[in-house]
Image (tube, helix red, strand yellow):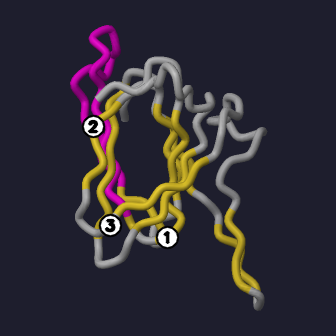
Amino acid sequence: MIDGVKTKNLKVIPDERGWLMEILRCDDELYEKFGQLYFTTTYPGVVKAWHLHQKQRDNFTCAYGMVKVALYDARKNSPSYGELNEFFIGEKNPRIISIPTFVYHGFKAIGDNTAFCINIPNNPYNYTEPDELG
């Protein structure tokens, strides 16, 4: 696993009305602070990659559909420099991935459905000076 990457399997709690899934709690080991929450979609087979952040930690999950998430450690001083991690997350494997700064990441919808993803970064998006390289 790339140094600083954390994951948590998400628990689905079903009942006769439907189901509930907690994604990130302030008492989770991977929680740092709240910046914002946003929702993004990607069409089947479409890749959204590569980018990284210098200040922001992403906390990324897929709520509907399935995505392949790839991470690449480009930090020369990291013990996992050059390592690539791949995760398949979504409704068949509910998991959140906490991605540290300076780790390239991207994702691709797999299967026949549009994937609906949620990100809870620890910093809000800065419209005048975006913290995104890619």
Residue at the spot x=32%, y=63% of the render? 109
Percent position (x, y) of residue 101?
Answer: 45, 23
Q: Indicate which disc, 2 or 1, sits on the residue closer to the N terminus.
A: 2
Percent position (x, y) of residue 56?
Answer: 53, 25
In the picture, measured across the screen, residue 101 lies left or right of residue 10, that is left
On screen, 4 above or below 19?
Answer: above
Look at label 3 and name its amino acid: Tyr
On screen, 93 above or below 35?
Answer: below
Look at label 1 and name its amino acid: Tyr
Viewer-closest of 89 and 51: 51
Q: Residues within 10 Å of mark 1 (few under 14, many from 20)?
A: some
Look at label 2 and name its amino acid: Trp
Residue that numbered label 2 is attached to: 50
Q: Is residue 70 magenta?
A: yes
Viewer-closest of 40 and 58: 40
On screen, 96 above or below 76?
Answer: below
Q: Circle 1 sits in a helix, a strand or a loop, which is it?
A: strand
Q: Circle 3 sits in a helix, a strand or a loop, which is it?
A: loop
Residue at the spot x=49%, y=70% of the render? 64
* Quadrant in which the C terminus is drawn: top left
The answer to whether the residues at label 3 and label 1 have Cβ atoms under 8 Å apart is no
Count the numbered circles shown. 3
